[in-house]
Image: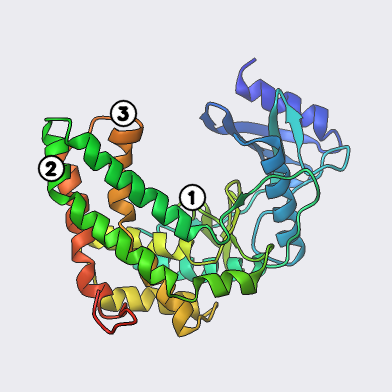
Amino acid sequence: MNNLNLGKQLMANHFPHLIVFEIEVIQDGGIKTIWKAETSAGTVCLKRMRKSIPIVRFTTEAQSYLFSKGALVAGIIPTKEDELFFVHEGYGIALYHWVDGSDLDMVENPEHLDEGLMGLAQFHKDSVGFIPSINYQTYNRMGVWPDHYEKMLDEIKQWKAESEERNTAFHLAYLKIVDEMSAMADQAIQLLEISCYSEWVQEIGEFGYMCHQDYGKGNALLTEKGVYVLDLDNLAYDIPLRDVRKLIGRRMEELEHWDSAVVEYLISCYESIFPLTPEQRKIIYIDLLFPHKFYGYVKKPFKKKESGEEKKLFKCYKFEIEKMAVLKQVLINERGSEV
């Protein structure tokens, strides 16, 4: 059965209370499939998720909670059994109200990024207070940053030893720059240790803010009501700054240089909705300091056995090194020396 006919069958079986006038497949990338349908309840979106059932249970419950609070997320239409999702051939499928709006391109369009950061801040504020039911599974990153940083640094160092056994242009280039990247990662670890991170995590508690983890074009829509946040499949409990760091990093990549005024402005956009203390704000800079882009690129050849390119490696290195001029202005360690 092709996916179009499958969508028709699923709607008839699980939502017989809705009349389907038209239906089409708008995303067909393997397991994750999305149908758009015109129904007696308006335009809807049927989505098959590539996640474990316990995670689907968590994310749909969280989305229902957010919607009930008035957060700008899509509402979920219950099945005939009054469930938030159903299972077909081992995969969770949910039906959402369709949200009309304009895609926010937060990488290339500065105005869109302003709107997106404010929408993200509101989403973070609204996410507090959700306590999942039993038999759930989620991505929980509360308190794990120090260990995660350490793990990434250990891998960076391990790959140095591996590169010493290889004689390719990529591995030789890696050896030239790995010590500087290791030192940068170690510096971020030390700064995180003396920051308010642990105290803030304790203060938030077990069920605090939820981060989107994949916030960007395609899942942030500007509407008359504000910014709707879509695709909550990767929701994770965490302090609410990781999403912010990713957006700032992507914008700096697009600019192809680090601009302290732009970084400050972007953080202020977020803070206009979600105020941060000076110490909490510093955690954004610490997370920016860690060489995430470098790690994200080199893990592909080392962990996934993809071919590494010397040119791309040095581009990542240049991006990481150039941020120091911006970050050293705000990150000063306890001994008073600059990063």
**Above or below, 132 relative to 33:** below
Residue 177 percent coordinates (x, y) = 16, 51
Report the residue marked by disc 2. 173
> Which callout, 3 or 1, points to the residue nearer the camera?
3
In the rendered image, the quadrant that contains the C terminus is bottom left
**Above or below, 75 relative to 117:** above
Query: Which residue of the protein is positioned furthest toward the right in this rendering?
Result: 81
Task: Please name the amino acid that badge 1 sits on.
Answer: Gly
Q: How many marks?
A: 3
The numbered mark, 2 or 1, whose residue comes first in the sequence reads 2
Query: Which residue of the protein is positioned furthest toward the top in this rendering?
Result: 1
**Above or below, 317 relative to 168:** below
The numbered mark, 3 or 1, whose residue comes first in the sequence reads 1
Task: Label 2: state its secondary structure.
Answer: helix
Q: Is residue 183 left or right of residue 264?
A: left
Residue that appears at 40% across and 54% down: 150
269 or 246: nearer the viewer: 246
Task: Label 3: state its secondary structure.
Answer: loop
Task: Please name the amino acid that badge 2 sits on.
Answer: Ala
State which quadrant residue 186 falls in.
Answer: bottom left
Q: Which mark is residue 305?
A: 3
